[in-house]
Amino acid sequence: MNERTVAERPSKVARRAAGYLRWYPRVWRARYGEEFQAHLEAELEERPISLRRAVDIAFHAVISRFRFQRGARWITGIALSAVVVVSLVVGFLGNGSGGLPVPLTIDTSSSVGMPTTPTTVNNLNFRFTNRKSERIQLTHVSLIGFKGYPVPRIVRVELDPQRQRKDDYELNPSNALFGLVPALGRELKLGNDDSLFVRMVAPKKGRLYAVSGIQLTYVRHGVSRTESRSIGQMPDVLCVEKSPPSQTVELPSCQRGIQTVWALAQFYAPLVNHDSTVKSMAQIVTGAAFGYTTGAEKKIPALSDMRSWATHLFAHRGSWRISGVTARRTNVTIGNVSHELTFHFAFVNRASGEKANVCVQNGAYMEGGEITPEIVHCLRA
Amino acid sequence: MSRKSSPDLGSGSTFLILSSLADGEKHGYSLTKDVESFAGVRLAPGTLYEALARLEGMGLIEPVASDDRRRPYRLTAFGATALSEHVAAQSKILAESQRRLKRNWSPA
């Protein structure tokens, strides 16, 4: 008897969770249904009965129904009235209203992240991916910076209204502007695979510009909404070389600046585990030094390069201070050439004085590929 | 087009969720348990998922690909910056509150 009860419990819980889930509209269920049901099953296992939970789910389900299925038949007049009042309040407050966010996400075809000139127009591209089209009026677009670096200047925002036109552009660049329409201040119909281009310039020579995302303000169904779009873990960087344009692809001072921003982005990324901060710092210094030196067409960084990057990045940052860097030859492959190189980082905790050691071996570095510094055991000298 | 400041995170579920994700990626249930452990607040499922959808829309968090039904979420770089700025601003207010309490309301 007891065995049967235990065996039946999961299915009963799953049925109850599915019952709660059905309160939400289909659009919402398509996006969050599976994970929400798994979440509810865990909740129901832990607390089989909770009036607060039932009321909370019912309330948010009604709100979602109202957002996605205005006029849904099952909503009673009383519930509809209550939701109208709540929605008006939420709408008045701005953020959080107007249904799910417009599905615009960063497109990897964005052209930034490299040295540029003050007159070059660089693109941040966002792709609309949804089978159902949306009508919005885009009223404002601004760039979100990174760690105090200035943001580039937006020169125009445009919509490529058909994916086909983008394909034409890729096949025939002379048609680059074909089909693009100004996107600010007018009603746009966004269809699947349409692209929004944020075009910008880095106006001053010798300056480093960084972008971590954009902020969009748009009107949908008469409700204004402001949202942000991240461009990923690594900021995009624009840099204008002080010296006159040269034929070389890699520009030394810009290269150093770009490496710095990317290294800092890694340091501040939420994926950095606080339990292994020293390991992350050692990897970041190694990655920055290798990225910079290989960019400058040197094969591997000298020990002085490594020390310089350690100081440049972490002299006044983080709870640990890098007190020394030494190198020893082990076994590492860089490009097609085998080297033997392991860097030994010594750390001192700024607050407690605790000491730590981390050794990093730069793993296989393929030309044009990713540099993956690996933590290794520190061998005795 | 000038740069806008980071979004206001308030002190409710938004702030609690971002604080929890600052420690690493989590799915909905583990996020609820974590928030309960460090803040003593139990986020109800409807509230939690409405907040997750809103934060995702704002670009402050992002889902992580998973084979499991339970989809984990993590903080984005933008989210980490926004949380960091919010904490710094709140810390200033707390410090000022403490200073005033100490000056005017501490026992003689």
Image (cartoon, coloured by chain):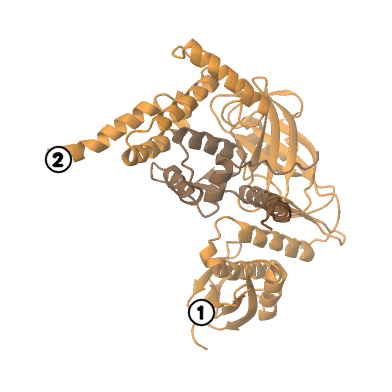
Kindly identify which chain the residue marked by label 2 belongs to.
A
| Mark seen at residue A331 | 1
- SS state under label 1: loop
Instruction: Name which residue lies at 61% across and 82% down.
Output: A326
Q: Could you tell me if residue A364 is visible in this image?
A: no
Seen in the picture, residue A338 relative to A240 is either above or below; the reply is below
Q: Chain of mark 1?
A: A
Q: Residue A149, relative to residue A20: is it above or below?
A: below
Q: Residues within 10 Å of mark 2 (few under 14, many from 20)?
A: few
Residue B43 drawn at (x, y percent): 47, 39
The three-letter amino acid code for the residue at tag 2 is Asn
Based on the displayed image, in which of its 4 quarters is residue A182 positioned?
top right
* Picture coordinates of residue A158, whole percent (x, y): 74, 33
Instruction: Work out whether mark 1 precedes mark 2 in sequence or the reverse, and give the earlier one.
Output: 2
As shown in the figure, which amino acid type bears the numbered disc 1?
A: Asn
Q: Is residue A39 above or below residue A192?
A: below
Which residue is pictured at 49% across the width and 43% down the height? B41
Give the letter of the orange chain: A
Comparing A161 with A270, the one in front is A270
Q: Quadrant of residue A46?
A: top left
- A235 vs A79, nearest the viewer: A79
Q: Same chain for the residues at labels 1 and 2, yes or no?
A: yes
Colour assignment, chain B: brown
The residue wearing badge 2 is A2
Picture residue at 40% right of the left edge, 39% below the top:
A39
